[in-house]
Image (cartoon, rainbow, N blue to C red):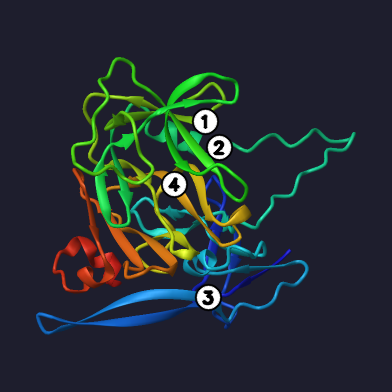
Amino acid sequence: MEFINLTPHAVSIRNEAGEEVLALPPSGEVARVAEQREALGLLAGIEISRASYGAAEGLPEPRPGVAYIVSALVLAACQDRPDVFAPGPAVRDAEGRVVGARGLSASAAYVAPTPEPTPETTPTPEPTDKAADTAASYEGAALRVFTVARGNVYEGAAAPEVTLASGAKISAVVIGEEGRGRKRGLLPVEWRGVEPGKFPGMFTPVGESGPRVCVAKIGQSRAGKPKLLAADAPTTSEYALVVLRTPMGYRGGNGHFGAQDDVPFPGEILVEGVIAQGAAGRMGSGEQLVAVLPRGVVFRTEYYGRLYGWPGAHFYVFDGERILAATREEIEISDDPIWDAARGNA
């Protein structure tokens, strides 16, 4: 397989051990998404505008045996291209600097090849689930839980009762949707005597109902999949568990990124879900995630398609106690240093 780097930066892809397995210099060609700016007048003498994003530009036609590496922003606009990938979650050194990406992120159209074992070989074992690695990394730590949705931040996450195909009933955080072109993601919750929380406001986040888990440890099921163990109080302020109920525009999609276009989503993803529009998701689709986010690291959600006046992106950061949210325009007029990475000053 030939990989072509269509970003303006060198790309370093790492494996689970942090070893570099693919190094790609820029090809000289850059794929981008069309950006439109809507002028919104002045605020305290400063020009305010709203960004929206359209189709990808500069992306070559599919070629057999060729895969294209693009930014996460471009990948989100190319969910019908199985040959287009973006760098995966960020890999950091001991000082917290980004040195590469863990694997590659695929579009919704990508279908993983199925290895065919031969009589001379043993079938390849299933790779270790990244969520299981994450659960081991935070073993024993009780994390604050938040839900974010289009710039709104809510304490806790709904964990309604869910009936499985076997007929068993469990409490679980549910993201995504069921159906063709869609994917429902479940993160089981064990209450262990902890009193469930209740939503503290008048309005409930879209797609949420039932009791809320507000603090939890990350454990593992018998199959090695992540699950939440409800706790009474947080024991760390360095990480937060975040449910990203990211919406999408009409006939569009969405994406999850770091502070800048060339920075991958900095969270450790535990569960993924897919929402969609139209039959089999043909009108558009997007991801929803449950992830562990480190303190002080900015992440953002982008929305594509017809937004009907909604901002095209929201930025978030965990400050140790709460999650702050802002639009790009709000960050441009803010002096808070916590948003420096989003301004490109980090």
Residue 129 bears which disc, if any? Answer: 2
Q: CA distance from mark 3 to mark 2?
A: 33 Å
Of the pair 79 and 269, the residue shown nearer to us: 79
Residue identifier under label 4? 289
Residue visible at 48% across and 52% down in the picture = 287
Q: Residue at x 52, y 71 (%)?
A: 10
Q: Earlier in the sequence, mark 2 or mark 4?
A: 2
- Kindly indicate whether the residue at mark 3 contacts the one at mark 4 (C-beta within 8 angstroms): no
Element assignment for label 3: strand
Residue 253 picture location, percent across and down = 49, 62
Marks 3 & 2, CB-CB < 8 Å contact: no
In the rendered structure, which amino acid carries the disc numbered 1? Lys
Give the CA separation, mark 1 to mark 2: 7 Å
Return the x and y of residue 211 as percentages of the image width and height: 31, 28
Tag 3 residue: 55
Q: Nearer the viewer, mark 4 or mark 3?
A: 3
Are the two marked residues, 1 and 2, in contact with CB atoms closer than 8 angstroms?
yes
Q: Which amino acid does the dot numbered 2 rest on? A: Asp
Q: Using the image as rendered, state which of residue 73 and residue 96 is in the foreground.
A: 73
Left or right, residue 237 beside residue 306? left
Q: Is residue 80 visible?
A: yes
- Left or right of residue 105: residue 345: left
Q: Residues within 10 Å of mark 3 (few under 14, many from 20)?
A: some
Instruction: Label 4: state its secondary structure.
Output: strand
In the image: residue 119, left or right of residue 337: right
Foreground residue among 260 and 36: 36
Amino acid type, callout 3: Ala
